[in-house]
Amino acid sequence: MSHSPNIRYIVKAGGRLQGSVRVAGDKSMSHRSIMLGALADGITRVTGFLEGEDSLNTLKAFRAMGVEISDPDNGKVTIKGVGLRGLKAPKSPLDMGNSGTAMRLMCGILAGQDFDSTLIGDASLSKRPMKRVTAPLALMGARVDSQGEKGLPPLVIHGGAGLMGVEYELPMASAQVKSCVLLAGLYAEGTTTVTEPAPTRDHTERMLRGFGYDVQTVGNQMSLVGGGKLTATDIDVPADISSAAFFMVAASIASNSDITLLHVGINPTRTGVIDILRLMGADITLTNEKEVGGEPVADIRVRSAHLKGISIPEKLVPLAIDEFPVLFVAAACAQGRTVLTGAEELRVKESDRIAVMANALQSMGILAVPTEDGCIIEGGQLIASAAPIDSHGDHRIAMASAVAALRVASGEVVIADCANVNTSFPGFVELSAGLGLAIVQEVAA
């Protein structure tokens, strides 16, 4: 994997967006399609698979555990499942690259195996706390060694522990932690129940049901009984709403813009970005709504609008947690003040997204005041920074900063350390340029 800090984006100020496009496949579902397809009995065929580094690392990890998986071909992948008990011990550590989702979900699966395994990641992932998953796994009887008080990677997972079902109340709204516990519950004796303080993305529950595994959901409580089996199925991965969000904001803030984003997943646990933008006055229309493989999808048309600052309802925060870097840009371009609270989870993503985005906006002349659990942003006129914006290797910071250039008065915006965009959105530069963003990528000397 290449995570060179020398790749940078140069984006000329201004412009408008026009056209229709299907953005990259949903990363959350791509991860899960490989995981559950590998653990199922039979052959699973996936279409729309995201061929980014994060999901490819998940694919490689299961190959390393003896699962036969085809090379992705235009988003098509075939997985010959080995069943819940068919994985084999990997000969070396499993590298999750930049993906916290993959590492946390894999913890749940590996905790139920009879063999030992080790999970590693890149420099960024190695700084992300994993105690939030190792703690509930320990309650189930798993043995996981980690580094320091926060439980940092590498993680050494000792097999053969014999897991027991638990009733676990999440201390924070996290789909990753919920999914980890539920996946471990597949291997546990008895019932595993997870209660979350607020709704989070439910792709794991939906996909488990798609593979024939009974998951009971009552309000914010999910339960399953261990010892069942997964049956292979076909999965159509829709376009990722988190990737589409960059263009929703871009078309909203750029004058004379009108775009349509095709076949986007609109799972109700993921549409907080649409709800927040509409509260800000965005012109967003959903058409061609349908359900594909248990997941709702739609075409999303977005036209230019005059956005206004708002106090973002805290109930929407978990439903848009990955979209806040670009929502910060929307707030910077809105009239008035936007206040975000209840988003402390942003401080432990690929970067401290509250601090890093506040710094990026400040460098472009916007008053952005970070708080412990959010940010206060005063909308205004963006200016081109004399120095490059440091994305800190965070793919969403890099893409959000590129979108901000649409409202810079003149000059160009330079964004450093952009290589990790390929982890979640390969082809971002080409697709953006095709819609009208004046962006180029270069490798600095």
Image (tube, rainbow, N blue to C red):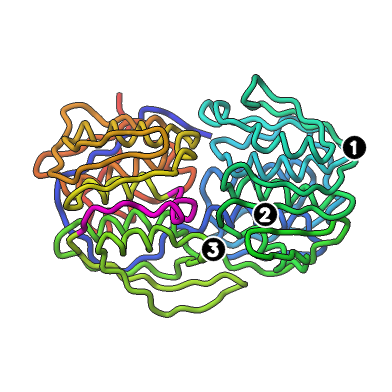
- x then y, percent, for residue 64: 74, 41
- 410 horizontally vs 70: left or right: left
View extreme (top): residue: 148
Residue at 30% over, 28% down: 444
Q: Is residue 321 magenta?
A: yes
Q: What's the residue type where badge 3 is placed?
A: Gly
Range of magenta residues: 307-322
Residue at 54% over, 36% down: 98
- x then y, percent, for residue 172: 58, 43
The answer to which image quadrant residue 32 occupies is bottom right
Of callouts 2 and 1, the N-terminal one: 2
In the picture, the disc for residue 34 is 2
Query: Which element carries disc 3, helix, strand or loop?
Result: loop
The answer to which image quadrant residue 146 occupies is top right
Query: Which element carries disc 2, helix, strand or loop?
Result: helix
- 7 horizontally vs 410: left or right: right
Does residue 133 lie above or below 148 as drawn? below
| Discs 2, 3 touching: Cβ within 8 Å | no
Nearest the camera: 77 or 266? 266
Q: Could you tell me which quadrant the C terminus lies in? A: top left
- x then y, percent, for residue 370: 33, 33
Q: What's the residue type where badge 1 is placed?
A: Gly
* Few, some or many residues within 10 Å of mark 1 (<14, 14–19, 20+): some
Q: Could you tell me which quadrant the N terminus lies in? A: top right
Q: Is residue 194 visible?
A: yes
Q: What's the residue type where badge 2 is placed?
A: Ile
Of callouts 2 and 3, the N-terminal one: 2
The residue that label 1 is drawn on is 160
The residue that label 3 is drawn on is 48
